[in-house]
Image (cartoon, grey):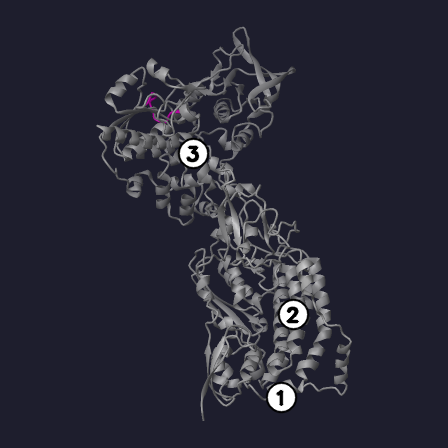
């Protein structure tokens, strides 16, 4: 190795250092005017409490367990968020910034602030707010961008029949996830459980999504059945409130929770259910319970009560169980096979379902009471409504439930062909309106090779319309003609023949107090020609089966029966109620009601038996 | 002869971390030496098995504080190998900048730091002050000065800013002018030469026996065994640089090599700034879904890079889960720091122990993992 030779003048080079000023940084400068950090500095955190939903994802990604979620009493405990906020232990924090990169709402950020000196160790444990650690507004430091985002914001695309096929077919249009797709979709979940709180049935959503992720569908099925005995139905028709509040939905597309639920049941044959679920009746209770109505609430109550050891008989007016699902849910959305998958397991537990028996007509409630200890009624909102406008009594003006039932019976080969109009007007903007419009559009295409379906709603934009976005988008693709912002004036009938409907422009749907109080522009009208009109303006209950004395003792407000938390009807202790007649039309609420009522009935019977 | 047991460390100022050597001395000559790692109480490898793939980013830079980016790089490369994800072109070049800057920072610390054990205290002051300028650049690029957590599986976390590029350019100019002063201060210094020339020898035959790599090996066996050359990663095959070699590895040669390699790193970074694409993506995610559920396919892999202290490798096994099944780190300074201490300190003086550590580039957490 050659040694560098030292120059004769080398020592002279050192002289320059004599005149060089030494670098010293006074302590005061460090504390009072600290050096400004770089723009990307990963300094102390701030958290926007308005945006933060307390999901705790930051805490889960933290490699040093520096983040703990703290319950904040002052925060409201509402749907879609948790009253918790992240706190950071700066004794542990490694300032990696992963919490910022994964924050589901973008509320947690890092600033350029980095200096904190204190003798009090507690000050290093800090709950970030927008104020920052010292209450001084400091510029933002490290921020997440598209490159560093640790969430997957895009939903796994669901395979669905193209509109050309859909509009001539009643075959289920949504094809379901493949294993790879389901696992990928499940991998997007951050297990914050916010969806579970919002789900009326409080399903173990995070658990079953994880089961899909780990490819353990048998455990997934068990997790589903903990709270919901209608997973195949809810995997298709649920109102999916869970997805509305999904944490991922704050910055991207929410997890497809409904389709994931369906994936589990689609991939387990129904004859395997007893073996997998392996549910034993925990006690044989000496009591009989009658359930009136085999809709979601009735079936749910039957399932849970039968597991508790009670003897259950369900009375159903129609020839098939299912309630409004039986004729309301179109086959392209909910095929009979899916419903039968759920019902057959419930029946296998010993639940007896008597169809074609209308309580109040074929058998009275008093007779049922004489045979049973408790009665659970879940008769649903089973009567269609019409608007009291001129011409609405015409024979070609239908309520939604009547026409839906006719169409479904025809499609499944159990009923005569309904009248198929060449031009249909549907009044209403909810999911039922979509069911009617899209079902009749299919029949029109099959019959005439073309369709003309008009949907007119008071709501002035698609965003305001109560129907799901999917329904509107798919309806448009299939050829439904939407006219938002119109209210019907009269049905035009000439010489006994239905000609169309006159509409006027709706300028306001709700008043300042948020009450339904539509206002119109009388001078702005249109006429839509049609040879059939369907009014999808809500449904109503039928309480004719309730004896007079019960109706007297029971509070019924806006068609809904007043019950306690466990579905026990106020004033009639042996009568329980649930489903639409308690909470309004919603499948998952019905399931939840059935579950709650089962607990209430169990408590009631046990208390009664103990008091003997 | 009276033999005494003397503890060097774990906090000896001439050492670069929590490492201890139990020395049995006769007068001031070391008779036997027992390296005592374990002072860090970390167990990095085991900890990694309990953390998500992304979580380990906060852990691995701590395996070697002076040059944390090497760990990030080799860890990322292992995952990329297992998953088969493509690293964006620009990310390759950015990674090289980071690695070379880290290499310079490490060499500066060592070059200046050698002044400590030999009594030239201006050396560490210069070395650390100039290294601080690199830390400023790191702060600009990554948002952190020491633990950057910047090179991630699939690329890097952020793109380079224009300001950062300007800062790098002006630093390179500064350093190039500054290095001759280091030569005057350290390399040509008679005090330093007297303490290191023909001392702390590493014979060629034991390089193979111990598995020494890096400067130790290159100065002893005359072979340009540099992973950047023999198994190029990132885009090292597209830049030109020279790897110094010699056939006589004494303490002096090894320190001088660090000085020479610093020039080469400057040369490499300049080429990168010329050749690097101006635009482009810098990160591809390693898996679908949220980072909480990222999984790496089943398999095992060994990846290696050239660190300032030699070959740095990760052997990783994945069982297809969200965490590694097994991680084994080949710390570059393991052979010379553990085996070398036991083999080569005997016969030297007590005050040579710290010199051995420095010239061989021993980084205790690499051993104590």
| Callout 2: chain | B
Q: Is residue A437 above or below residue B259?
A: above
Q: Position of residue A110 (x, y in %)?
A: 60, 52
Counting residues from the start of the chain, the first of labels 1 and 2 encountered is 2
Residue wearing tag 2: B131
Residue wearing tag 1: B194
The mark found on residue A175 in the picture is none
- Work out whether disc 3 and disc 2 sit on a shared chain: no
Q: Main secondary structure of the magenta part?
A: loop
Q: Nearer the viewer, residue A550 or A495?
A: A550
What residue span does the magenta drawing correspond to? A316-323
Q: Is residue A329 above or below residue B306?
A: above
**Around disc 1, counting alpha carbons within 10 Å, would you say few (fewer than 14), some (14 to 19), or many (20 or more)?**
few
Q: Is residue A525 above or below residue B148?
A: above
Q: Quadrant of residue A44?
A: bottom right
Q: Is residue A14 above or below residue A52?
A: below
| Callout 1: chain | B
Q: Nearer the viewer, residue B190 or B289?
A: B190
The mark found on residue A200 in the picture is 3
Marks 1/2: CA–CA distance:
26 Å
Q: Position of residue A400 (x, y in %)?
A: 46, 20
Element at label 3 = loop
Q: Position of residue A580 (x, y in %)?
A: 41, 25
């Amino acid at each position: 190795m050659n040694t560098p030779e030292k120059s004769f003048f080398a020592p002279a080079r050192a002289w320059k250092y004599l005149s060089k000023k030494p670098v010293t940084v006074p302590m005061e400068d460090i504390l009072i005017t600290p050096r400004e950090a770089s723009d990307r500095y990963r300094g102390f955190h701030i958290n926007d409490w308005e945006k933060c939903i307390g999901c705790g994802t930051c805490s889960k990604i933290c490699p040093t367990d520096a983040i703990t979620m703290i319950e904040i009493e002052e925060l409201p405990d509402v749907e879609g968020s948790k009253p918790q906020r992240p706190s950071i232990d700066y004794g542990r924090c490694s300032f990696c910034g992963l919490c910022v990169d994964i924050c589901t709402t973008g509320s947690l950020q890092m600033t350029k602030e980095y200096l904190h000196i204190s003798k009090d160790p507690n000050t290093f444990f800090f709950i970030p707010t927008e104020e920052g650690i010292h209450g001084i507004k400091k510029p933002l430091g490290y921020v997440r961008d598209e490159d560093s985002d640790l969430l997957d914001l895009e939903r796994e695309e669901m395979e669905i029949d193209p509109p050309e096929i859909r509009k001539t077919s009643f075959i289920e249009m949504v094809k379901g996830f493949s294993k790879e797709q389901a696992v990928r979709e499940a991998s997007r979940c951050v297990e914050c459980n916010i969806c579970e709180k919002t789900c009326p049935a409080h399903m173990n959503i995070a658990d079953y999504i994880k089961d899909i992720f780990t490819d353990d569908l048998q455990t997934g099925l068990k997790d589903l059945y903990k709270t919901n005995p209608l997973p195949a139905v809810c995997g298709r028709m649920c109102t999916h409130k869970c997805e509305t509040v999904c944490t991922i939905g704050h910055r991207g597309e929410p997890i497809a929770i409904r389709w994931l639920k369906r994936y589990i049941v689609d991939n387990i044959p129904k004859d395997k259910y007893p073996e997998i679920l392996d549910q034993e009746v925990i006690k044989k209770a000496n009591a009989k319970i009658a359930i009136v109505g085999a809709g979601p609430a009735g079936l749910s109550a039957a399932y849970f009560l039968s597991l508790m050891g009670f003897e259950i008989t369900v009375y159903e007016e129609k020839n098939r169980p299912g309630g409004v699902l039986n004729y309301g849910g179109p086959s392209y959305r909910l095929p009979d096979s899916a419903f039968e998958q759920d019902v057959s397991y419930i029946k296998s537990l010993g639940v007896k379902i008597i169809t074609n028996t209308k309580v109040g007509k074929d058998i009275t409630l008093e007779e049922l009471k004489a045979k049973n200890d408790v009665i659970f009624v879940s008769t649903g909102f089973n009567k269609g409504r019409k608007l009291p406008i001129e011409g609405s009594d015409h024979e070609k003006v239908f309520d939604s439930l009547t026409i839906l039932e006719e169409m479904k019976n025809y499609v499944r080969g159990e009923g005569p062909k309904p009248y198929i109009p060449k031009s249909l007007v549907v009044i209403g903007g909810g999911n039922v309106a979509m069911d009617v419009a899209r079902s009749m559009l299919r029949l029109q295409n099959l019959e005439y090779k073309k369709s003309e379906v008009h949907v007119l709603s008071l709501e002035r934009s698609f965003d305001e319309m109560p129907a799901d976005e999917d329904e509107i988008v798919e309806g448009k693709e299939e050829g439904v003609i939407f006219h938002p912002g119109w209210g019907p004036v009269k049905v035009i009938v000439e010489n006994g023949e239905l000609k169309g409907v006159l509409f006027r422009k709706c300028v306001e749907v709700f008043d300042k107090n948020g009450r339904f109080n539509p206002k119109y522009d009388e001078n702005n009208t249109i006429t839509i020609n049609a040879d059939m009109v369907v009014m999808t303006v809500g449904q109503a209950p039928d309480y004719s089966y309730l004896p007079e004395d019960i109706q007297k003792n029971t509070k019924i407000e806006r068609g809904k029966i007043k019950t306690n938390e466990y579905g026990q009807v106020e004033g009639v202790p042996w009568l329980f109620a649930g489903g639409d007649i308690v909470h309004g039309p919603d499948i998952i609420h019905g399931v939840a009601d059935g579950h709650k009522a089962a607990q209430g009935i169990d408590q009631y019977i046990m208390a009664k038996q103990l008091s003997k | 002869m009276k033999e005494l047991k003397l503890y060097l460390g774990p906090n000896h100022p001439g050492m670069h971390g929590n490492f201890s050597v139990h020395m049995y001395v006769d007068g001031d000559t070391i008779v036997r030496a027992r390296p005592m790692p374990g002072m860090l109480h970390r167990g990095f490898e085991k900890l990694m098995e309990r953390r998500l793939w992304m979580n380990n980013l906060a852990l691995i830079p701590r395996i070697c504080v002076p040059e944390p980016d090497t760990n990030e790089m080799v860890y990322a490369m292992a995952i990329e190998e297992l998953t088969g994800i493509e690293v964006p072109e620009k990310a390759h070049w950015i990674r090289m900048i980071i690695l070379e800057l880290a290499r310079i920072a490490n060499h500066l610390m060592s070059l200046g730091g050698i002044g400590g054990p030999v009594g030239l205290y201006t050396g560490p002051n210069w070395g650390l002050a100039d290294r601080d300028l690199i830390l400023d650049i790191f702060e600009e690029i990554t948002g952190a000065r020491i633990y950057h957590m910047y090179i991630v599986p699939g690329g890097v976390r952020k793109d380079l800013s224009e300001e950062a590029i300007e800062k790098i350019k002006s630093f390179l100019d500064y350093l190039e002018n500054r290095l001759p002063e280091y030569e005057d201060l350290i390399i040509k210094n008679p005090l330093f030469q007297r303490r290191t020339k023909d001392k702390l020898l590493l014979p060629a035959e034991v390089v193979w026996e111990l598995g020494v790599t890096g400067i130790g090996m290159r100065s002893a066996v005359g072979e340009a065994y540099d992973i950047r050359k023999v198994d190029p990663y990132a885009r090292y095959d597209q830049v030109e640089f020279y790897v110094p070699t010699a056939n006589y590895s004494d303490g002096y040669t090894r320190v001088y090599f660090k000085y020479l390699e610093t020039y080469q790193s400057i040369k490499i970074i300049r080429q990168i700034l010329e050749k690097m694409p101006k635009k482009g993506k810098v990160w591809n995610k390693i898996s679908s879904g949220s980072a909480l559920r990222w999984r790496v396919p089943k398999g095992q892999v060994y990846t290696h890079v050239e660190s300032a202290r030699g070959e740095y490798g990760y052997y990783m096994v994945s069982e297809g889960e969200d965490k590694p099944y097994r991680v084994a780190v080949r710390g570059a300074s393991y052979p010379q720091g553990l085996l070398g201490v036991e083999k080569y300190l005997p016969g030297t003086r007590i005050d040579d122990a710290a010199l051995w550590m420095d010239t061989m580039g021993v980084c205790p957490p690499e051993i104590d993992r």
